[in-house]
Image: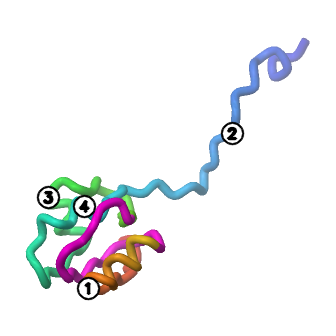
């Protein structure tokens, strides 16, 4: 029996998947009102990992307006940021 038939087959690994560093809205409440929250500010506070794009999710509430710049947003997060009077801007991953 050839070796490739004897070895067990174990799933599939997608080489094209994008792994995000996830930040929730409740994590953004520590920033002052009117602040610009970008990827560098998130990494400085330890909320995002280095070398990974950042995705903002809509878990939690946002009480004040912020300008949030990240690589991706969930629909709920973008909706809640705009409802609080802020803006959600999509930037490219460097």
Disc number at residue 18? none
Q: Work out how far the residue at label 3 is from the one at label 1, CA to CA, in angstroms.
A: 20 Å
Please provide percent x and percent y for residue 4. Answer: 81, 22
Disc number at residue 26? 4
Say which quadrant the N terminus sits in: top right
- Secondary structure found at label 1: loop
Of label 3 and label 1, which has the lower sequence position?
3
Residue at (39% x, 77% y) in the render: 78
Is 12 positioned to the left or the right of 83 in the image?
Answer: right
Please provide percent x and percent y for residue 49. Answer: 28, 53
Q: Which residue is mark 3?
A: 45
Residue at (76% x, 18% y) in the render: 7
Q: Main secondary structure of the magenta part?
A: loop
Q: Indicate whether residue 61 is drawn in magenta.
A: yes
Q: Which residue is mark 2?
A: 12
Crowding at mark 1 (Cα within 10 Å: few <14, some 14-19, many 20+): many
Q: Nearer the viewer, residue 60 or 28?
A: 60
Callout 2 touching callout 1 (CB < 8 Å): no
- Secondary structure found at label 3: loop
- Secondary structure found at label 2: loop
């Amino acid at each position: 029996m050839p070796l490739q038939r004897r070895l067990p087959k174990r799933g599939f690994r997608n080489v094209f998947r994008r792994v995000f560093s996830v930040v929730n809205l409740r994590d953004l409440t520590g920033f002052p009102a009117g602040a610009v929250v970008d990827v560098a500010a998130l990494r400085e506070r330890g909320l995002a990992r280095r070398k990974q794009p950042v995705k903002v999710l809509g878990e939690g509430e946002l009480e004040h307006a912020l300008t949030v710049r990240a690589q991706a947003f969930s629909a709920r997060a973008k909706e809640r940021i705009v409802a609080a009077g802020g803006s959600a801007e999509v930037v490219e991953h460097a």
